[in-house]
Amino acid sequence: MSDQDRIQLLQGTLDLLVLQTLVLGPQHGHGIATAIQRSSDDVLLVDHGSLYPALQRLERAGLIGSDWGTSSNNRRACFYKLTAKGRKRLTAETGKWEKMVLAVSRVLKPSAEEA
């Protein structure tokens, strides 16, 4: 898939996807970006210029925590983990997101009675 076919993420969407990715366990920034891209079958592109400010914002809000460790390629890296507050936010935001997706889908593809 070419870069122009990939979709860049809006701030709120990126936050939600980061929280969901961390449900699987602690991960460093590059690992989070790669996991989101792979999970979306390479449709979603996570720009590192957006990811790291999002991680800092989520940490300031108490939704994620961080610890320094060693990555799989033996480099020092900051690993992020989901907090209890982050897990609650993820649940709430996932419900809102699912409602929005349904609403947008109804607008884009109205039923025969609505058309």
Image: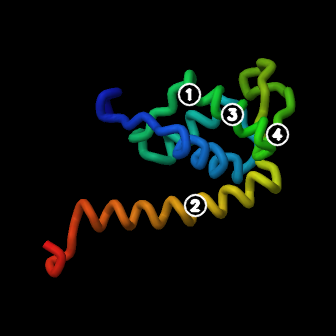
Question: In the drawing, what numbered circle is on residue 23?
Answer: none
Observer able to see residue 103: yes
Q: CA distance from mark 2 to mark 3?
A: 18 Å
Residue at the spot of label 2: 94
What's the residue type where badge 2 is placed? Answer: Thr
Marker disc for residue 65: 4
Query: Disc 1 on helix, strand or loop?
Result: helix
Label 1 or label 2, whichever comes before in sequence order: 1
Local SS, label 3: helix
Residues at discs 1 and 4 in contact (Cβ within 8 Å): no
Which residue is pictured at 74% across the width and 57% down the height? 87
Residue 25: % across, % down? 75, 48
Q: Residue at x 54, y 62 (%)?
A: 96
Pointers 1 and 2 in contact (C-beta within 8 Å):
no
The quadrant of the image that shows the C terminus is: bottom left
Horizontal side of residue 1 vs 92, given as left or right: left
Residue marked by disc 3: 55
Residue at image mark 1: 50
Could you tell me which secondary element the residue under label 4 belongs to? strand
Q: Tell me whether the residue at label 3 lies in contact with that at label 1, contact meaning CB atoms closer than 8 angstroms.
A: no
Q: Which percent across, then down, holds residue 105?
A: 31, 63
The disc, 2 or 3, on the residue closer to the chain's N-terminal end is 3
Mark 1 burial class by Cα count in 10 Å: few <14, some 14-19, many 20+? some
Amino acid, disc 4: Gly
Q: Quadrant for residue 113, please give it.
A: bottom left
In primary-sequence order, the first of circles 3 and 1 is: 1
